[in-house]
């Protein structure tokens, strides 16, 4: 019996190239934007990009994970606030999330999430590729800011991250308020008040 590459515990052969990954991600983004989430599959991405399915599976466990990353294409890189400061970096990061999920495809994914099984492949992909990756990016930004002396080191970083990102996710899934352009700066400003100045 052949082993499913999506759950293989080891990775043999040459590591997948960044160029192949980028081609697959570009193809997935095009399918997602022009044809919809339901038409995105590993087979469709392989055919459109020319990248083999085993290579695609080395980067993404399934089509849902690939769809989430394709939706977030252009998401700011983790860390690197530098001279811009923590508030500006958080604003840019959260604004990218808002823009992604304010699109037609983003809203479709949000509606699908609202009715999905919490343990489904789709929900796990959202948790891993959007929620957890966003939190890790925020964790890095906060740690860098504390290291520069811009803020005091937070005592309960998990609670701080919850308070920064939960309002966005709540609006996304509950739909009680829009994902408007003012949300990102408001959340970033609130995070700065929460974190407080050094000393």
Image: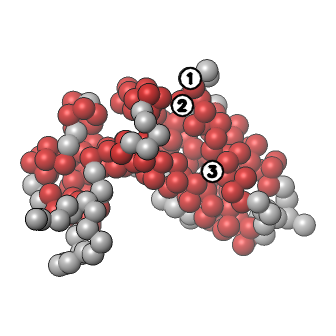
**Looking at the image, is 173 positioned above or below residue 164?**
above
Instruction: Say which quarter of the image contains residue 33.
Output: top left
How far is the residue under mark 3 from the one under mark 1? 22 Å
Q: Is residue 188 visible?
A: no
Q: Which residue is mark 3?
A: 90
Left or right, residue 150 beside residue 122? right
Disc 2 and disc 1 in contact, CB within 8 angstroms: yes
Residue that lies at the very extreme toward the right in this rendered image:
199
Quarter of the image where the C terminus is located: bottom right
Q: Farthest residue toward the bottom?
A: 13
Q: Which residue bears the numbered disc 2?
A: 172
Residue 64 occupies which quadrant of the picture?
A: top left
- Marks 3 and 1 close (CB-CB < 8 Å): no
Percent x, y for residue 44? Answer: 14, 43
Q: Earlier in the sequence, mark 3 or mark 2?
A: 3
Q: Which residue is mark 1?
A: 175
- What residue do we see at 36% from left, 30% from top? 105
Evaluate if marks 3 and 2 touch, with contact meaning CB atoms under 8 Å apart: no
Vertical position of residue 138 compared to residue 199: above or below: above
Q: Nearer the viewer, residue 93 or 115?
A: 115
Q: Tell me which residue sits at (12%, 59%) in the image.
A: 52
Label 1 SS: loop
The answer to which of marks 3 and 1 sits earlier in the sequence is: 3
Distance Cα–Cα, label 3 vs label 2:
18 Å
Observer-side mark, 3 or 2, equals 2
Q: Secondary structure at mark 2?
A: helix
- Residue 28 in the image, given as x and y percentages of width and height: 24, 45
Using the image, determine if residue 197 lies above or below residue 121: below
Residue 87 horizontal/vertical position (percent): 69, 51
């Amino acid at each position: 019996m052949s082993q499913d590459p999506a759950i293989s515990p080891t990775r043999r052969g040459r590591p997948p190239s960044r160029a192949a990954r980028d081609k697959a991600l570009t193809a997935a983004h095009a399918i997602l934007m022009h044809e919809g989430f339901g038409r995105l599959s590993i087979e469709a991405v392989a055919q459109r990009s020319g990248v083999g399915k085993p290579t695609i599976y080395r980067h993404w466990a399934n089509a849902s994970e690939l769809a989430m990353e394709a939706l977030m294409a252009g998401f700011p890189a983790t860390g690197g606030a530098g001279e811009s400061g923590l508030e500006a970096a958080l604003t840019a990061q959260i604004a990218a999330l808002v823009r992604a999920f304010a699109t037609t495809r983003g809203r479709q994914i949000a509606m699908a999430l609202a009715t999905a099984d919490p343990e489904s492949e789709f929900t796990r992909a959202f948790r891993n590729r959007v929620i957890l990756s966003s939190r890790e990016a925020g964790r890095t930004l906060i740690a860098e800011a504390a290291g520069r002396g811009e803020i005091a080191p937070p005592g309960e970083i998990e609670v701080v991250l919850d308070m920064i990102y939960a309002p966005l996710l709540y609006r996304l899934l509950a739909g009680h308020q829009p994902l408007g352009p003012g949300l990102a700066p408001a959340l970033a400003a609130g995070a700065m008040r929460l974190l407080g100045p050094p000393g």
